[in-house]
Image (cartoon, rainbow, N blue to C red):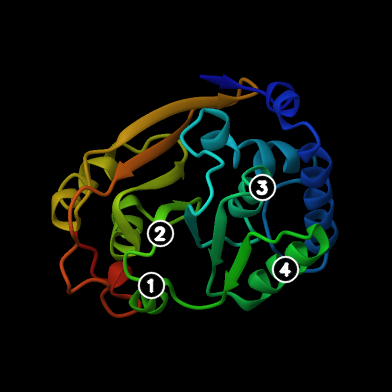
């Protein structure tokens, strides 16, 4: 599937102006605080277009009372672009780095986003207070699939989805993840391959939560990385 800035811009309508304002806020702050490694000329493609793929292809819809969690949101990617186009959906954006959440709070205020809540804490601690609270969990964080599966499992309702933005060569990650999907209550993944502006292939990996997660999850902060399940 080939996606372009032009195709997505056509579908955005009056949301385009808000999304451009978000990239301008990010560019401005990124000069003083290291919020993202993208070059300025890549911002719209990498920050906006890539973030909107789940909306563009129809796996995230603008329904009321839907709750979405963005794990490791960083500078609000992909949560803020998705919150702009899916204004009926409530987004919770979490990151353990204060400087990044401070920027997300600033962007939320400047863009007048009523459907965004921010959290600066470890996802494992957050999960203890929000078991089975979300319909969808999204992440463009760097962590491996097995780690993100473990983070998301106790947070998702049965029937909910985990949507991961991944680059190329994810076969080994997916192979490891297959060993723990059943344990954590997930289906086997659906992998959607796409390209942006003729760029290299990328992968959107979607897991459905189909059964309960054992009560021993979440584990203590840091354990998913130190002692991964697979």
State the residue position of label 1: 130
Q: Confirm or deny contact between disc 2 and disc 1 (CB under 8 A).
A: yes
Q: Earlier in the sequence, mark 2 or mark 4?
A: 4
- Dot 4 surroundings within 10 Å: few (below 14), some, or many (20 or more)? many
Q: Position of residue 195 (x, y in %)?
A: 55, 25
Q: Is residue 156 left or right of residue 123?
A: left
Q: Nearer the viewer, mark 3 or mark 2?
A: 2
Q: Position of residue 162 (x, y in %)?
A: 37, 48
Q: For the point 66% across and 36% down, which residue is it?
A: 49
Mark 3 or mark 4: whose residue is earlier in sequence: 3
Q: CA distance from mark 4 to mark 1?
A: 24 Å
Q: Which residue is mark 3?
A: 81
Q: Residue at x 51, y 36 (%)?
A: 54
- Tell me where residue 51 sits by quadrant: top right
Residues marked 4 and 1 touching at CB (< 8 Å): no
Left or right? Give the position of 167 relative to 175: right
Nearer mark to the viewer, of 4 and 1: 1
Q: Earlier in the sequence, mark 4 or mark 1?
A: 4
Quadrant occupied by the C terminus = bottom left
Evaluate if marks 3 and 2 touch, with contact meaning CB atoms under 8 Å apart. Answer: no
Q: Nearer the viewer, residue 126 or 179?
A: 126
Mark 4 lies on a secondary structure that is helix
Label 2: element kind: strand
Q: CA distance from mark 2 to mark 1?
A: 8 Å
The residue wearing badge 2 is 134
Q: Are marks 1 and 3 in contact (CB under 8 Å)?
A: no
Q: Residue at x 50, y 54 (%)?
A: 65
Residue at label 4? 103
Q: Decide: few, some or many residues near mark 2? Use Cα within 10 Å; few <14, some 14-19, many ≥20.
A: many
Q: CA distance from mark 3 to mark 4?
A: 14 Å
Coordinates of residue 130 in the picture (x, y in percent): 38, 72
């Amino acid at each position: 599937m080939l996606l372009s800035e032009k195709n997505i811009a056509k579908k955005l309508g009056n949301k385009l102006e808000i999304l451009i304002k978000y990239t301008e806020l990010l560019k401005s702050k990124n000069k003083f605080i290291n919020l993202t490694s993208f070059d300025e000329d890549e911002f719209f493609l990498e920050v906006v277009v890539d973030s909107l793929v789940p909306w563009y292809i129809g796996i995230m819809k603008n329904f009321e009372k839907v709750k979405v969690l963005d794990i490791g949101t960083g500078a609000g990617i992909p949560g803020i672009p998705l919150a702009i186009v899916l204004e009926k959906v409530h987004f919770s954006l979490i990151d353990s780095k204060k400087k990044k959440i401070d920027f997300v709070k600033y962007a939320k205020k400047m863009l007048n986003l009523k459907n965004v809540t921010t959290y600066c804490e470890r996802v494992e601690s957050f999960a203890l207070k929000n078991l089975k609270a979300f319909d969808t969990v999204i992440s463009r964080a760097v962590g491996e699939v097995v780690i993100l599966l473990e983070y998301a499992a106790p947070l998702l309702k049965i029937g909910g989805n985990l949507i991961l933005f991944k680059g190329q060569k994810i076969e080994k990650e997916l192979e490891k993840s297959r060993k723990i999907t059943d344990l954590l209550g997930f289906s086997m993944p659906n992998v959607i391959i796409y390209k942006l502006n003729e760029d290299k292939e990328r992968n959107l990996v979607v897991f459905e939560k189909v059964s309960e997660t054992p009560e021993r999850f979440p584990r203590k902060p840091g354990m998913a990385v130190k002692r991964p399940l697979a």
